[in-house]
Amino acid sequence: MKKLLLTISISLVLIACGSVKKTQEALNTGDYDMVINNAINQLKKNKTRKRKQQYVHLLETAYSKAVARDLAEIKFLKKEGNPEKLETLYTIYTGLDNRQESIKPLLPLPILKEGRNARFAMEDYSEEIIDTKNKLTEHLYERVSQSMLLNKGNKYEYRKAFEDLQYIDEISPNYKNVQRLMEEAHAKGTDFVLVQLNNATDKVIPRRLEDDLLNFNTYGLNDMWTVYHGNEIAKINYDFGLILDFRDIQVSPEQIREKQIIKEKEIKDGWKYALDNNGNVLKDSLGNDIKVDKFKTIRCELYEFTQFKAAQVNGQVRFVDYRTKQLIEAFPISTEFIFEHAYADFDGDRRALDDRYRDLISVRAIPFPSNEQMIYDSGEDIKARLKAILTRNKFRR
């Protein structure tokens, strides 16, 4: 037990030393906020313990350096006066405030050797945060308004505008008509894809298969900027077309394949007395007659039948840009659905059969599915393949 406690203690010391070393390395490379976060996590419990003093020193040093660097960058950005840097300025101010707020719960932090508390310069940044936020909000709003006015029809610009509007709504909720502009930017930045089926085969595609393939709500593919429609909506100008061409559908004839299997097995068939060479009944050591099992061979002829029918569907998926009337890309798509049903009959002693065959003779023939049903049953695999193609190849202009 003493050895175990010693091992645990040494391990904890090594872990602590490793953590201090990593934190010191972060300080040396200028990753001050990492140092601050590590030190705060270490000091949340037992901050006055002697082995935690290294973290107090690291925290004091890193905080001082981080604040000095941020204030120097603020001074530069203000002197530069570029409105595009307002977001950076706002982020720095909020970072300064958040950093000191994360340290406040730990204060005071005593430095035992020096008989003092660690020093952390705390400032009220609320006025600077509010002023910068207001300027940033106004700047972004003006930029978005100009962009949406000048870049009509440019979906990429509408998406950028939407992101700016989202940020405005985050830092300045209910600002002017931001919500309405967000709806407009989202609507105008969305790509609408019309999905169509073409049947170039001599087979009839079941209506319910068409409905299933065109029901894109079940695909889960709609995202922030792409919406698929299986039915055309008159008021929408579609950006892309997804066309599923059925080029060949083959359904095999109904087949019943027969196979004959002969099974033999030896089974017990009563008993008889054991006889010696002279025909006398043998006795055991107690004088009792000896009995032995009798065996006989049984035979069964099994007739296994397999009902078989297959449907193969081949086609192509085409991505079309409706604005340029150009083919973007085409992908082959094919699938096969097989109907197979086995049953059996027998002649002879069924006890000669294995379990598998005994189960099979209890099964009877069933009606073959229609050609329409076979084509429909191929649809689930077609749908899965179509979804895989769309997942790998997003519509983007």
Image (spheres, helix red, strand yellow):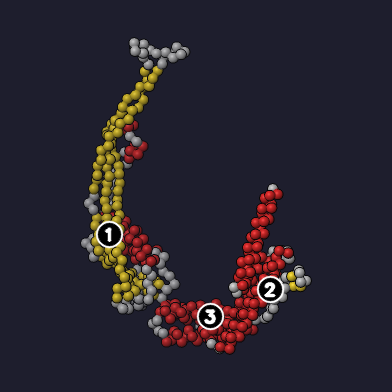
Q: Tag on residue 148? A: none
Which residue corresponds to mark 1?
313
Indicate which label's residue lies in the foreground, 2 or 3. 2
Q: Looking at the image, tell me whether mark 2 or mark 3 is earlier in sequence order.
A: 2
Indicate which label's residue lies in the foreground, 2 or 1. 2
The three-letter amino acid code for the residue at tag 1 is Val
Image quadrant where residue 42 sits: bottom right
Of residue 180 and residue 122, the one placed in the foreground of this image is 122
Of residue 221 and residue 397, the one placed in the foreground of this image is 397
Q: Residue at x 58, y 79 (%)?
A: 91
Which residue corresponds to mark 2?
60
Q: Looking at the image, tell me whether mark 2 or mark 1 is earlier in sequence order.
A: 2
Q: Looking at the image, tell me whether mark 3 or mark 1 is earlier in sequence order.
A: 3
Is 340 situated above or below 314?
above
Whether residue 33 appears in this view of the structure is: no
Q: Position of residue 251 (x, y in %)?
A: 24, 55
Q: Quadrant of the C terminus?
A: bottom left
Which residue corresponds to mark 3?
168
Q: Position of residue 154 (x, y in %)?
A: 40, 81
Give the tally of numbered discs: 3
